[in-house]
Image: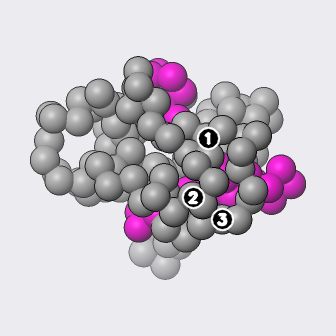
């Protein structure tokens, strides 16, 4: 199994990952519809990509009152059963890594599913190593912290 690793020290804030994600998942280039959110701190000129890191705890799955979220067997990624989702946003609130966003128009959470094992955000990252796709056992600890 693999997961995304985020290294904010390498991020330039170019938004390539956000745009690639929204296009791959929603068919449009939109920062609002991306599963990746780059937090920008203009005062310090720093950028911090936020995305579901497929954490071991899966609090989003536990928080869902209707069982609309599950773990994919093939990739280990979170999977949303849209037809079951009631749009309660409990998964958004439950994520301690700020990795779940919400699609206001559709009333559904935006959760990274690792693009079936070939994440678009990683493929288009303009600064290699800001986003990487690594084996879960390659590193200990959280994958959103720089090493």
Q: At which x and y percent is residue 112?
A: 53, 41
Confirm or deny contact between disc 2 and disc 3 (CB under 8 A): no
Q: Count the numbered circles shown.
A: 3
Per the rendering, the mark at residue 80 is: 1
Q: Earlier in the sequence, mark 1 or mark 3?
A: 1
> Which of the two discs, 2 and 3, sits closer to the camera?
2
Q: CA distance from mark 1 to mark 3?
A: 13 Å
Per the rendering, the mark at residue 25 is: none
> Which of the two discs, 1 and 2, sits closer to the camera?
2
User: On the picture, is 112 further left or further right than 127?
Assistant: right
**Camera-nearest residue between 144 and 63:** 63
Q: Residue at x 39, y 48 (%)?
A: 53
Q: Disc 2 on helix, strand or loop?
A: loop
Q: CA distance from mark 1 to mark 2?
A: 10 Å
Q: Which residue is mark 2?
A: 64
Q: At which x and y percent is residue 101?
A: 62, 58
Q: Residues within 10 Å of mark 3 (few under 14, many from 20)?
A: some
User: On the picture, is 41 further left or further right than 26?
Assistant: left
User: On the picture, is 96 further left or further right than 32?
Assistant: left
**Camera-nearest residue between 76 and 6:** 76
Question: What range of the chain is rendered magenta?
Answer: 95-118
Q: Disc 3 on helix, strand or loop?
A: loop
Q: CA distance from mark 2 to mark 3?
A: 8 Å
Q: What is the residue that sits farthest to the front in this orientation? A: 66
Q: Which residue is mark 3?
A: 89
Q: Earlier in the sequence, mark 1 or mark 2?
A: 2
């Amino acid at each position: 199994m693999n997961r995304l690793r985020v290294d904010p020290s390498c991020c330039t804030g170019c938004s390539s990952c956000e745009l690639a994600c929204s296009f791959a998942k929603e068919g449009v280039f939109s920062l609002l519809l991306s599963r990746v959110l780059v937090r920008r701190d203009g005062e310090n000129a720093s950028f911090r990509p936020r995305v579901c890191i497929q954490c071991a705890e899966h609090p989003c799955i536990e928080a869902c009152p209707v069982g609309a979220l599950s773990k994919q067997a093939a990739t280990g990624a979170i999977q949303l059963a849209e037809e079951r989702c009631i749009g309660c946003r409990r998964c958004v609130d439950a994520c301690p890594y700020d990795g779940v966003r919400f699609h206001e128009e559709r009333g559904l959470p935006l959760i990274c599913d690792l693009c079936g094992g070939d994440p678009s955000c990683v493929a288009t990252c303009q600064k290699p190593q800001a986003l990487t796709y690594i084996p879960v056992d390659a590193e200990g600890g959280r994958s959103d912290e720089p090493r």
